[in-house]
Image: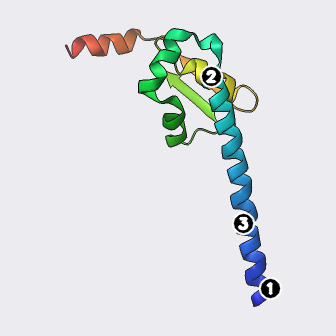
């Protein structure tokens, strides 16, 4: 019984550590994307209030996900998500905002 328990615990440990590696890799990609100067000073100035690293980690973003960004506006998140997902994930952006604008105006 003891060897089976040891084997089971070892399997769980290996699985947990491999997941930590993926999370660390995604966090490094996020940090690099957030610090990328191509985002521009106006976007970077918004980071203090929007906290992109903490927000995207809270949502569980991983670099191999398929992400749909609805109504991207000025592309503040797009400029962070695109480089993180470029290698093994994908980013789809729904730009058409006519329907959303109509719903917002109707609620005014």
- The secondary structure type at the circle numbered 3 is helix
Tell me: 29 left or right of 40: right
Question: How far apart are labels 1 and 3 at the CA level?
Answer: 15 Å
- Give x and y (percent) for residue 11: 75, 69
Q: Is residue 95 visible?
A: no
Ranked by sequence position, the earlier of labels 3 and 2 is 3
Residue 105 drawn at (x, y percent): 25, 10
Q: Give the labeled residue for mark 2.
A: 35
Q: Nearer the viewer, residue 69 or 14?
A: 14
Q: Tag 2's secondary structure?
A: helix
Q: Is 45 placed left or right of 104 in the picture?
A: right
Q: Badge 3: how crowded within 10 Å, few (<14), some, or many (20+)?
A: few
What separation in Å lies between label 3 and label 2 (alpha carbons)? 33 Å
Residue on which the image places disc 3: 13
Q: Position of residue 8 (x, y in %)?
A: 73, 75
Q: Residue at 40% of width from left, 8% of height from top?
A: 98
């Amino acid at each position: 019984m003891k060897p089976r328990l040891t084997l089971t615990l070892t399997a769980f440990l290996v699985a947990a550590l491999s997941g930590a590696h993926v999370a660390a890799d995604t966090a490094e990609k996020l940090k690099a994307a957030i610090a990328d100067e191509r985002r521009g000073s106006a976007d970077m100035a918004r980071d203090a209030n929007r906290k992109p690293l903490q927000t995207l980690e809270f949502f569980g973003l991983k670099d191999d996900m398929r992400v749909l960004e609805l109504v991207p506006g000025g592309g503040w998140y797009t400029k962070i998500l695109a480089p993180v997902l470029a290698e093994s994930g994908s980013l789809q952006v729904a730009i058409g905002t006519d329907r959303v604008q109509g719903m917002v105006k109707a609620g005014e």
